[in-house]
Amino acid sequence: MGSGQELLECYIKMIKIRAFEEKVALEYPSGKMRTPTHLGIGQEAIAVGVLSQREPTDVVFSHHRCHNHFLASGGSPYSLFCELLGRVDGCSGGRGGSVHLVDRSVNFLGSSPILTQAVAFAAGAAFAFKLRKQQRAALVFFGDAAFEEGTMWETFNFSVLHKLPVLFVCENNLYSTESSLEKRAPINTSFTEKSRAFGIFASTCDGNDVEEVSKHSRAAFEHLKSGRGPYLLECLTYRTREHVGPSFDYDLKRSYRSKDEILKWTIKCPIIKTGDILKRVYGFTESELSSINKQESKAIDDIFNLAENSSFPSLGTHFDHLYGTAIKGQ
Amino acid sequence: MPEITYAQAISEATCLIMGKDPSVVLMGIGVDYSSGVFGTTTEAYKKFGSERVIDTPAMENALTGIAIGSATVGVRPILVHARNDFMFLALDQILNVSAKWNYMFNGNAGTLPIIIRAIIGRGWGQGATHSQSIQSVLAHFPGLRVVMPSNPTDAKGMLLSAWQSSDPIVILEHRSLFDIKGEVESGMALTNLELSKVVCEGSDLTIVATSVCVHESVLIAQALKPLGVSIEVVDLRSIQPIDRSTILESVKKTGRLLIYDTSWVNFGVGAEIAAIVAESDLMNLKSPVVRVGQLGVPAPVSKPLEDQHYPTYESVMAIVQKMMARKITETKSIPSITNDFQGPY
C-alpha cells in the first residue's frame, strides 16, 4: 500500500467506526437507545476493506449488524446516533432503528435484518445495472447463517444465470446468535466451496486484515466490472460482543463460548493489527496513532451530545409515508 | 368501445405500460411461453422480447427480493404468479419488506413501486393448493395495496393505475374471469385503486362482493328485480385500503348486508366488512349480517365434494331470500361462470 497513506486512511475509518460502536456500548445501558443493537466491534476491517475498493456509484446493502457498513459507506454518524435514539434526524427518521438504515446520498440503499432479504436486493440492483448496461456493481454484507436460508441459493442461481455484477460479502464470525457453526453445518463445510459449486467465483480471506480484505475486494470488483458474473468473498472474523446488546458474553455468564476464546480473538483485533503494520512498516509512532484515537473519540462524543439534544418526531406523523398518493380514476 | 376479454385487457395494459416506460420489466414463470400466462403476456413478449419479458426459475422469494432491489435503483418490475398459492413462498419479501419499505425508512429509502399479479384458481379439481385466495392475509399488513379486478375494464385500469402509483401492489386476478368480455376504453383508462363501486343499485339488501363473486351477485340482483326485491351490489375492488364509506352508505340505505368473497369466511374480508358495519353508528339492521365463501376446509378434488365446497348461484340466492324473509319459488338454475374451466391449469 505505497506510502502507507491508503492503509492509514483505512485505519482512521476503522477507528471512527470503533469509536462509534464503543460509544453506543457505553451509553446503551442508560436505556436512551431503545432499539435492539448488533454491534460490529471486531469486524471493522471487512466493511472498511471492501468499501475502500468500490466506486461511489456502486450500491451497498446490509443485514442486521449494519452500523459498520453504513459508516464505512460514508453514512453520517450523527444520523445514525439519531436513529438509535429515535430522533427525527435519524437516517430513517427514528422509525427504523438499528437494523433499518439507509442513506441514498452515499448509495447505501438499505439494511434489512431478516436473513438474506438484502442478498436478493443486491442481486436485484445488479440486475438493473445489467439491464441498462451500466458499469455499476451492487454489494451486500451478510453473516454465515445466511447460507442456511433457501433464498441464498435461489439468488445465487439467478445471479450466475444472468451474470449479475453483484459482490456477496460473507462475514463469517462463527456464530449465529448463540449457535456455533458446528451446530449448524456439517463439519468441514466451506461456504466458499459451496458457492463455487453454484458457479460463483469465490475466495476466502482473513477478515481481520484490512489489507487482505482490500486486496481480495479489488480483484472481486475487477471481476464484476469485466462482466463475468457474481463474486463471493468469505471473510473470516469474530464479534467480540454479545449477539445483540453492548455486553461481553462472559460478563453475562453465557456459556456458548469461553472467555479464553473471546480474548484470543480480541488480540487479533483488526485495528491493533493495522496499527502494528503502520508502525513497523511505515514508521508511524505510537503517539501519532494514539492521538488519532483520542481525536476520534472526542469527535464521536461531541456528535453524540448533538444527537441527544435533537428532536423526537412530532406526534401526528404516524401515517406519513404509509401510502403514496391515490391514483384518480373511475 | 371495443369489446375485449379480461385476459386481453391485462395484455393491453401491460403493452401500454411497457411501451411508455422502458424501466418496466415483466418477470415470472412462463411469461415467455406461447400460452403466455393465459394469454396475458404473449403480446408483451412479442413486442419487447426476452430482455424485458423474463422467464424465471422457480424462486418466488428471491425473485421478489430481486424485484425490490431493482426498484431501489429505478426499475419498475411486474411479477406474475400463475397461481397465487406459489406466491406464499414470497411472503417474507412482500410482507416484511415491500409493505414497510417506504414507511420504515421514513421515505428516505425511496418508494417501492412493484406490481405483483397473482391468479386465483377454482374448480376442475385444482384442489387444496391451487385454489386459495390470499387477499385477507395480504390486506392485514399496512402499506401494501391489494386489489381484485372483477371485469376487463378494471383488469386494465388497475394495472395502469398500479404503474402510476408509487406503492407496492398485489393484483389478484381470478382464473374464471379470463375469458369474460366487456367494453374497454382504449388508451390510459385508469381505475381508482381505493374506491369500491356500486355496480347495481338497490334498496333492500347490499351484497358486497369480490372478484368473480360480483358476477353471480349481479345475476341474483337481476333475477330478483322483477319479483320486487331490490339488491344493491358493491364490487369491493380494493381490499386494502378498504373503502368504508361506500360500504356504509349502501348498508345505511338497505339495512341488510351479505358479503360474498372468494376465500374462506373466517378471519376474511367479510369479517372485516362486518366489523366496519358493527363499529359504525348504523343501528338496527333488518337482518343479521351473513358471510358467504368457501367451506372452511381445504378445497377437495372429488367433483361431488368440490361442488359442495363453493357457494353457487342457487345457494347464495337461498341465503338472500332467507335474509329478505321471502320465499320465491322456482329459482332458475343458471350455469356459473366458474363451471366452464377445464384445465389444464
Image (cartoon, coloured by chain):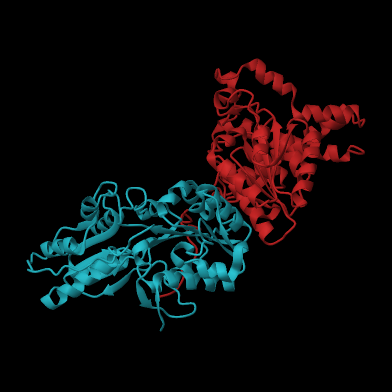
Q: Quadrant of the N terminus of chain B?
A: bottom left
B135 and B8: which one is in front? Answer: B8
Identified at 36% across, 48% down, the residue is: B129
**Could you say where residue A304 lies in the image, as x and y percent from the top left?**
66, 41
A21 and A243: which one is in front? Answer: A243
Q: Quadrant of the C terminus of chain B?
A: bottom left
Number of callouts: 0
Q: Does residue B281 appear anywhere in the picture? A: no
**Could you say where residue A71 lies in the image, as x and y percent from the top left?**
69, 43
Tell me if residue A37 comes above or below residue B298 in the rendering.
above
Q: Which chain is red?
A: A
Identified at 74% across, 21% down, the residue is: A267
Tell me if residue A181 comes above or below residue A215 in the rendering.
above
Residue B338 relative to residue A221: left or right = left
Identified at 16% across, 67% down, the residue is: B333
Classify residue A235 by image quadrant: top right
B47 and B267: which one is in front? Answer: B47
Q: Which chain is cyan?
A: B
